[in-house]
Amino acid sequence: MKFEIKNLNIWFGAIRALKDISIDIHANEILSVIGPSNSGKTTFLRMLNRLNDLNSNFKMTGRVMFGAQDIREIDAELLRKKTGMVFALPLPLPLSIFDNVAYGIKMHGVKNKKKQAVIVEHALKQAYLWEEVKDRLNESAFKLSGGQQQRLCIARSLAVEPEVILFDEPCSGLDPISTAKVEDAMLKLKADYTIVLVTNNVKQAARVGDRTAFFLSGELIEVDKTEKIFTAPRDKRTDDYVRGRFG
C-alpha cells in the first residue's frame, strides 16, 4: 500500500472541500480520479504532497499515511521529492532542456556533470522524449512543442527519483497525438511508480486507470476497478457521470 487515507476532511476557511474520504492507493497502480468541476479532485491530489498547506485557510482532519508515516510528520520538501507533481499546463523553467531536467538533482546536491548526464538521459528516456531531444539538449526548453514540454516536466519529476507521480489534468491542453504519448509514458511508468491521475477526460481515465475514483461535491462516491466503474458502477450518480448525463 502506498497511501492509506481514513476519514479525511479538508476545509478552506468555512468551505468544506472534502468530506470524510477513505481510500487506499496501491503501489504500482494508476488511480484515475474523475468528477465534475468543484468536486474536490485537485484538492485531493494536492493533499498527497501537502501543497494545500501553502493556503493559510487550509485545515485538515483525518489520517493520511504514506507508507508507515503520517504525511504531517514528514518534512514537506522530502514528501514532495517522493511525490512528484505534473500540472495541467507544462511549466518549463527558462533554461535549456538539459538544465530543466537536471534542476532538481542539482538542488539535491548532485554536482558531478557525468552523473547529471546519466540521470538526465534516463529520465528523458522514461518520459519518452530522449529520441526527440538528444541532439538539442542545450536548446531552450521553450522551443519544444506543448506536448514535448509536458513530457519534459514529467522527466524533471522523474529525475529526483520519486515513488509517486501526481498528474493534474496533464493532457488538458494537448492534441490527441501528444496526449497518446503522455498516456503511453504513464502506462510504462507504473511498473516503477505509483500514479494518481486527475482528469476531466473520462475516456482517458478508462484508457489508463487500473482503478477509478469518482468524486462529487467533495465526496468520494465510489472507487473500483476501472472496468467496473465504466460498465457496472454501484451508484447511479457514477453511471450518469461516465455516460455524460451531467458534468
Image (cartoon, helix red, strand yellow):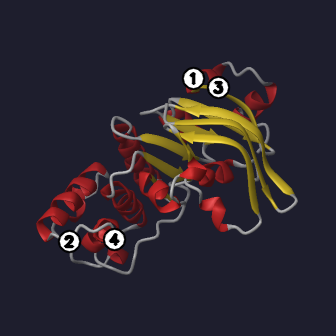
Up the image or down, 122 lies above or below 222; here it is below
Mark seen at residue 229: 3
Q: Is residue 128 left or right of residue 153?
A: left
Q: Which residue does the image show at 34% across and 34% down from the upper left?
A: 191
Under circle 4, the secondary element is helix
Q: Which residue does the image show at 39% across and 65% down from the upper left?
A: 149
The residue nearer to you, when weighing 149 against 69, is 69
Tell me which numbered mark, 2 or 3, is placed earlier along the sequence.
Answer: 2
Q: Is residue 243 left or right of residue 171?
A: right
x and y, in percent, of residue 7 in the image: 74, 36
Under circle 2, the secondary element is loop
x and y, in percent, of residue 224 in the image: 62, 24
Alpha carbon distance from label 2 to label 3: 47 Å
Up the image or down, 81 lies above or below 201; here it is below
The kind of residue tagged 2 is Lys
Residue designated by label 2: 111
The kind of residue tagged 4 is Met
Dot 1 alpha-carbon crowd within 10 angstroms: few under 14, some 14 to 19, many 20 or more: some
Alpha carbon distance from label 1 to label 3: 6 Å
Question: Picture quarter containing residue 124?
Answer: bottom left
Residue designated by label 1: 227
Q: Which residue does the image show at 20% across and 71% down from the upper left?
A: 111
Question: Picture quarter containing residue 187?
Answer: top left
x and y, in percent, of residue 236 in the image: 80, 25
Tell me which numbered mark, 3 or 4, is placed earlier along the sequence.
Answer: 4
The kind of residue tagged 1 is Glu
* Residue 81 seen in this snapshot: yes
